[in-house]
Image (cartoon, helix red, strand yellow):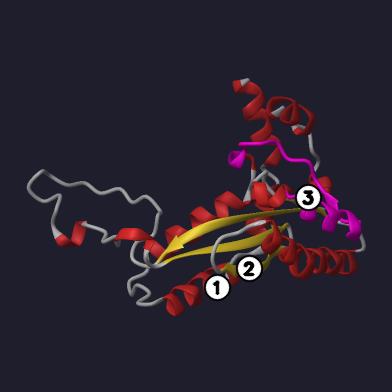
Amino acid sequence: MRLDWAKAHQNLANDELDSWTFSDEAPFELLCSSYRQRIWATPETMCKPNLVCPKAQGGFGKIMIWGVISVHGPGPLLFIEGGMNGESYKSIVRETIIPYLSQLADDFGRSFGFVADNAPCHNAKIVREEFAKSGANRINWPASSPDLNPIENIWGLMKMGLAKLTVKPRNMGELKGKILEIWKGLTPEYCKSIIYSMPQRCKEVVKAK
């Protein structure tokens, strides 16, 4: 199914992608960004304090965020308290996603499609019913395909930005503030460039069969 989807979308034109939006969730940690950092160290220096990233046990200081992008730049960003289930995602659909798609349609005079992965909460019956009731265009998406979703590049960029901060966030409030700061600094040009890479992503899937 993934290969068939890639074959069907490998020739997407930019003007088609202009009306797609891409969403996803991602975890961010207070004490240590999950962005992978490479260092060069000898056996004698590998455990020096300045080369070690501290990490707390039990997931302390972790927060989940949900966001959505289009070629027009970053859209809403939400901090998810607790776990995500069908009921909580339905609230996001009703209170955030549908108004966002409607606002884009009003601003640019065209309807916009919405991409989310196949997490169970995204495909719950009450979520499907909420989308159907609104008339929103939910784009079919192949399972197990984070490599096709441009917003994954955004998460990597944001985690890199947090990892490179000279002054690290000291509490969850500061972490949220830095995440919002980086999110709001995303440019439409960058969002457009990664979204326009969709055909090439599909071609790579086809090439790899």
Which of the two labelled residues, at mark 3 and mark 2, occupies the earlier sequence position?
2
Residue corresponding to mark 1:
180
Q: Which residues, given as a range, are shown in magenta?
A: 124-147
Question: Pointers 3 and 1 in contact (CB under 8 A)?
Answer: no
At a point 87% along the width and 56% down the height, the residue shown is 136
| Residue 115 pos. (x, y %) | 73, 49
Magenta span has 181?
A: no
| Residue 133 pos. (x, y %) | 90, 58
Q: Which residue extends farthest left?
A: 44
Of 7 and 128, which appears nearest the observer?
128
Mark 1: secondary structure = helix
The three-letter amino acid code for the residue at tag 3 is Lys
Residue corresponding to mark 2:
77
Q: Is residue 87 above or below residue 197?
A: below
Q: Is residue 202 left or right of residue 157?
A: right
Classify 10 Å Cα crowding around label 3: few (below 14), some (14-19), many (20 and above). Answer: few
Question: Pointers 1 and 2 in contact (CB under 8 A)?
Answer: yes
Q: Is residue 175 left or right of residue 145?
A: left
Q: Is residue 150 left or right of residue 177?
A: right
Residue corresponding to mark 3:
125
